[in-house]
Image (spheres, grey):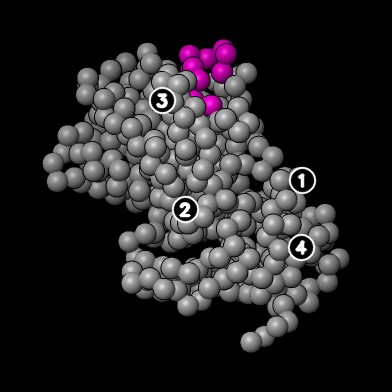
Amino acid sequence: MNTNPDRKLILEDGQEYFGYSFGSKEDKILEIVFNTSMVGYQEIISDPSYTDQAVVMTYPLIGNYGMAADDYETEKPTIGALIVREYNDEPSNFRSEKTLSEVMERYGISGISGLDTRKLNRSIRDFGSRKVLLTGADTPLEEGLSKLKSYEMPKDAVSRVSHREIRVARPEKERFHVVAIDCGMKENIVRSLVALGCRVTVVPWDTDTDFIISQSPDGVFISNGPGDPTDVPQTIETVRALKGRYPIFGICLGHQIISLAYGAKTYKLKFGHRGGNHPVKNLKTGKIEITSQNHSYAVDEESLKGTPLSVTHINLLDNTVEGTACEEDRVFSVQYHPESAPGPRDSGYLFDEFIKTMEGGRTHA
């Protein structure tokens, strides 16, 4: 076994972390973030919301149960890189069809293992998410820092991950028709809606309002996705035109887009929320939900005061807004992921609430 590190991370402040390659060996500049989930690495690497990001897994052992065909959240994963303490290339799982490294190599996802992920994670907590270069161990530090300084992070992530073709998922017995605006949507959202009897017409992120209206939906769904919500003004304008006409439900980026459409503001968190154990309080019921989360941006609570939106959920770790609603327009959204995959299933009731909002029929403008 090769004991000499062949890869390294260079952070903007000059920190270096040496390790061993797996997956693709492509050099990349990405935004470094961390995820505290103990399981679900397959769903994490196939979640389009991680586009252009290098994800540090705080759980130390990754790869041990391999990769299963039924567990992908998108057909073509777009995460930038995976950073782990210990990588296992000999999975033990009867469902496993490929190793994690094989899948990452196929889709150009870089990997590095063997480094001190605890120290790296503390650095992200202390100094925030920032640019990182994943490169060969022999790359000079000065060269790496120069590349980081001159590199501008792209702002077109949603357009790169949203499907360009319209597709339809049908239940065995159709009750409702939902148009889902795909900003980088996880497949388990579609599965969750179909399981409740919804025919789901998935449309690209920049689909115009007239086309959506022409589909005569019972409700509209705004999906999760990567990046800054202000980078998708077309989607914001579409929601602005549709609100009050149809019931609307948004998750994660969709939550932020809905808030922007109502005139609120968003801001970037220091290091975001990513993991499967975030406590969220439902202000309507007083109950605490343990939630799955993955986002860098949040809705500014102060900016909601001049809008028809009310806060429905808050994060108990930092009191950030986790849900909003406008009952008059039958619009609601949450910052976290009720579809799980991976994560706890405390919040599945939100899909039931969406069904209830559609049962009364559409409200025409």
Q: Residue at x 66, y 57 (%)?
A: 30
Quarter the C terminus occupies? top left
Q: Are marks 3 and 1 in contact (CB under 8 Å)?
A: no
Badge 2, how many Cα within 10 Å: few under 14, some, many 20+? many
Please indicate, yes or no, whether residue 213 appears anywhere in the rendered image: no
| Residue that label 4 marks | 10
Image location (x, y in percent) of residue 335: 50, 34
Does residue 105 show up magenta in the picture?
A: no
Q: Give the spatial CA distance, label 2 vs label 3.
A: 23 Å
User: From what the image shows, is residue 175 above or below residue 202?
Assistant: above
Asked which quadrant contains residue 207, the reply is top left
Residue under pointer 2: 47
* Mark earlier in primary sequence (2, 3): 2
- Describe residue 102's horizontal placement relative to residue 197 as left or right: right
Label located before the other in sequence (1 or 2): 2
Which numbered disc, 4 or 1, marks the residue that appears first in the sequence?
A: 4
